Image (spheres, rainbow, N blue to C red):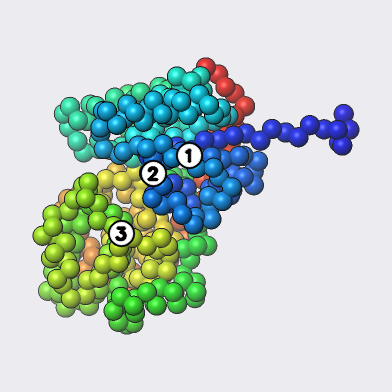
Amino acid sequence: MTESNAVPAKRPRIAFVCTQSFALTTLYRGLFPHLRERGFDCEAVTGDSDYLGGDPDLEGVPVHVIPMVREPSPWRDLVSLIRLIGFFARHRYDAIHVSTVKAAFLASIAARLTGQSAILFVVRTRIYQGRTGLGRKLYEAVDGLVCRLSRYVAPIGREMGEAMAADGICPAPKLRYFGAGSSNGIDTARFSRSPQALAAGMAIRREAGVPDEAPLMLYVGRLAYDKGIHHLPAAMDLLAERSIPAWLMLVGPVDWREPVDPAILADLDARDGVVRLGFQSDPAPLYAAADLFLFPSAREGFGNVALEAQAAELPVVGFDTFGVREAVQDGVTGLLAPLGDTAAFAECTARLMADGALRRGMGQTASERVRTQFSNQRVWADLVDTLHDLAGSKRA
């Protein structure tokens, strides 16, 4: 066959399913353009349209909204499942990428019931981590079912995958790892401490009333109990006790599904040197304008924001817990306190805020580690290989 008469290769069609549009616009940043360049046609399914407007990554990506809710709701979940079954009966894909707990559960069942078995389950968190009793068993059963229905299972950290295999949640041969870990890899150029990022961050600081010369600690994420916001007042108290100057900027929405004690938020809001900005679509300038990143989360899939902060040369203070200790090297790129030890977290914070040379040295080491081990290009290369594998092999 001559080149002029060659039949163009079929572009594999990939569906990405997640529970909320916020996850779609944050956890997949940069991925869809990359996959299109490598010959894939991408579509997305999400439970709402709240964050879909104006995202350039979604240009040319059909987005189908099928209502899903994050919290357990048997009747609403049944309705969502029926709608997903109808959707997959009408739309055929070469591979289906499912992530986030509810979407993975419902979409994997719907896909299988409509004869589509090329499913990749990306595990971003073990929501039952730290739980006991019936609640844990139910969540383990959900994850176990999705693993059985999926062709491949990709935990975003090796510690997570090893635990899933050890706990009998997923057979080890199904596990796939992308790069050194993380949800989507890090665009290291985007989070570099460039003059442009520094200028933009300084402008945001000034608008928020943070003095130019003030050392700034940064928190980025949902304001929720499991994110550890309740540990921050003690850190501020210790800094004040030792006369260590520091401001704290909280960036992220209040999550009323996992609420922080209102007294904690009121305490922080009443303090001099604490500002809240709410959700910011692009936190990169804030990383560049800060001096230390606080990450008091009790559980994480991996800790993407911690990697973003380190890419911007910020050391991290966090807890030595699942998903965080892979993202942060204790004593090398940050300091990790024993899980739940508020006093130790405060001590780590004070140590780094009092020692600029230590802080800057750790930040530079952190940036290099992210660049060499967690770049999105490295993560995406492994994902592309897996999608080609799925698209070329549709075993039942």
Q: Nearer the viewer, residue 248 or 356?
A: 248
Q: Which residue: 54% across, 42% down?
A: 62
Looking at the image, which residue sits at the far top? 396
Residue 285's spot in the image, x, y percent? 42, 69
Residue 121's spot in the image, x, y percent? 43, 32
Q: Which residue: 39% across, 77% down?
A: 202
Q: Answer whether labels 3 and 1 touch (C-beta < 8 Å).
A: no
Please say if 243 is above or below 60.
below
The quarter of the displayed image where residue 36 is located: top right
Residue 41 visible within the image: yes
Looking at the figure, which quarter contains the N terminus?
top right
Tally of marks: 3
Please say if 2 is above or below 250.
above
Q: Nearer the viewer, residue 242 or 382?
A: 382
Residue 300's spot in the image, x, y percent? 31, 46
Q: Which residue is mark 1?
A: 64
Type of the residue with mark 2: Asp
Report the mark closest to the observer, 2 or 3.
2
Q: Which element carries disc 3, helix, strand or loop?
A: loop
Q: Which residue: 43% across, 29% down?
A: 84
Q: Which residue is mark 2?
A: 48
Type of the residue with mark 3: Gly
